[in-house]
Image (cartoon, rainbow, N blue to C red):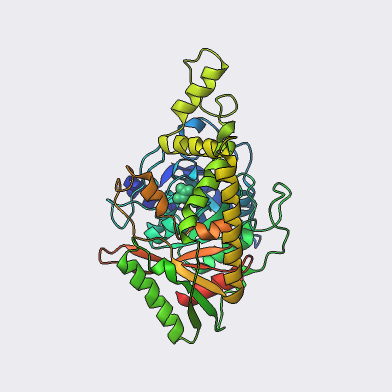
Amino acid sequence: VEQYLRNIKERAELNAFLEVFEEEALAQADAVDQKLANGTAGKLAGMVIGIKDVLAYKGHSLQASSQILNNFKSLYNASAVQRLLDEDAIIIGRQNCDEFAMGASNESSAFGNVLNADDHTRVPGGSSGGSAVAVQADLCLASIGSDTGGSVRQPAAFCGVIGMKPTYSRISRFGLIAYASSFDQIGFITKSVEDAALLLEVVAGKDEMDSTASQREVPPYSQLLTSDKKYKIGYIRDCFEREGLDTEVKDAILGVKDMLRDAGHEVEAVEFPYLDYMVPTYYILTTAEASSNLGRYDGVRYGYRSDNVTDLTSLYKKTRAEGFGHEVQRRIMLGTFVLSADYYDAYYTKAQKVRRLIKEKTDELLQAYDFLILPTAPSTAFKIGENTANPLAMYLADIFTVQASLAGVPAISIPVGRDANGLSIGLQLMTRSFEEPALLAFSNYIL
Ligand code: GLN
């Protein structure tokens, strides 16, 4: 803990942490020492973890990197956080992210950019940018974040670490600030597959506080990490033929594909006809859900309240105008529009139908193939400011991560190389729902 605290201070310019729980983490470490001495320590004894600022940690500030939650403190622990603590993990701090987890570069945080530790002029990815950089720069051993459309996988790819999003419903969302509830899933950023497996094992499973959490038994993931099976692997041909896909990223992923074929796995190109519909469908549905989920920040119930107000309506308006940043406001407006009476069928209902098609096609492919491989992102970490003037370009860069989120299947990003600038390249693997054991074992094998 002392070493990580020193690292955090020395690398303060990265802006990965919004708050460091110095005294508390040291006290937790002492308590773990005692438990280790008397043989009562839990599975995560001494694992130093950072939490993205969207997870409730009792008695601590929680603000989704937004001004609208200024001065808000959690009254309870998220179930995931509680389970980490129950197994003696040490929580070292609260990590910077895009405001309400909306973004892919950590540039929408109300508390400033996070810098990629490999190149300070570049973004760390997002929305879990602080969480990825914290692991990249050894500011903690592992981070726990959230992934709605790539927020764990894409920053992991940009920072050269591992990012895993389990099957939708595998982990309770109780105490996770909602962005788009039918997509949101807690995930992990780590340096090893073993750590991801161990964290999943501790955090997954049924929860009486979240009726959408799966009742399925939780396998002992950390003991299922070896695999000598020969798999059937599909790669979506259209993904690799897309304009805008960086050639170095493409070559790295295709290189792994060839390596797998040489190693005796069956590798085939597959067709996926819905690639162009992925990003529009994702953004119609997530903004719709977000506009509803963020209705609760009204200046009355939580955090920030504007003080120059005259009546209730102006209280709502001013609080929300001052408290939310531009990206969040844009998404609330988009979501409100697609849910409005005149446009509901044309956009929202249509997008629900397309989501169903995407899910069915993805599941069908995953019946025929054990894994689908594709890049995590079309490029390596881009320059800070490069995409801020063009939100559409930023949204389109989510093209490869949103498929797993629309389909609810598990996916992981693992580092498989670097480009000529020394920036990390992430390979993404998807598999069938609840097949995390195979996903983790196969990732371990590739690495
Ligand atoms: N970049 C995507 C978005 O902005 C993903 C964010 C996320 O997974 N939370 O919606």
Can residue 306 be seen here? The reply is: yes
Residue under the point 42% across and 45% down? 17
Is 126 drawn above or below residue 365 in the view shown? Answer: above
**Quarter assignment of residue 343:** top right
Q: Position of residue 178 (x, y in %)?
A: 58, 43
Lateral position of residue 238 relative to residue 367, left or right: left
Residue under the point 55% across and 84% down? 230
Residue under the point 36% across and 72% down? 252
Residue at far top of view:
310
Can residue 3 be seen here? The reply is: no
Out of 9 and 73, give the one closest to the viewer.
Answer: 73
Lateral position of residue 240 relative to residue 227, left or right: left
Residue under the point 30% across and 45% down? 385
Is 311 drawn above or below residue 324 in the view shown? Answer: above
**Quarter assignment of residue 432:** bottom right
How many numbered discs? 0
Q: Where is residue 77 in the image (x, y as percent from the top left)?
A: 62, 44
Out of 138 and 245, give the one closest to the viewer.
Answer: 245
Lateral position of residue 264 relative to residue 206, left or right: left
Is 226 drawn above or below residue 134 in the view shown? Answer: below
Out of 16 and 432, give the one closest to the viewer.
Answer: 432
Q: Quadrant of the C terminus?
A: bottom left
Q: Position of residue 210 (x, y in %)?
A: 69, 48
Q: Where is residue 108 in the image (x, y as percent from the top left)?
A: 40, 41
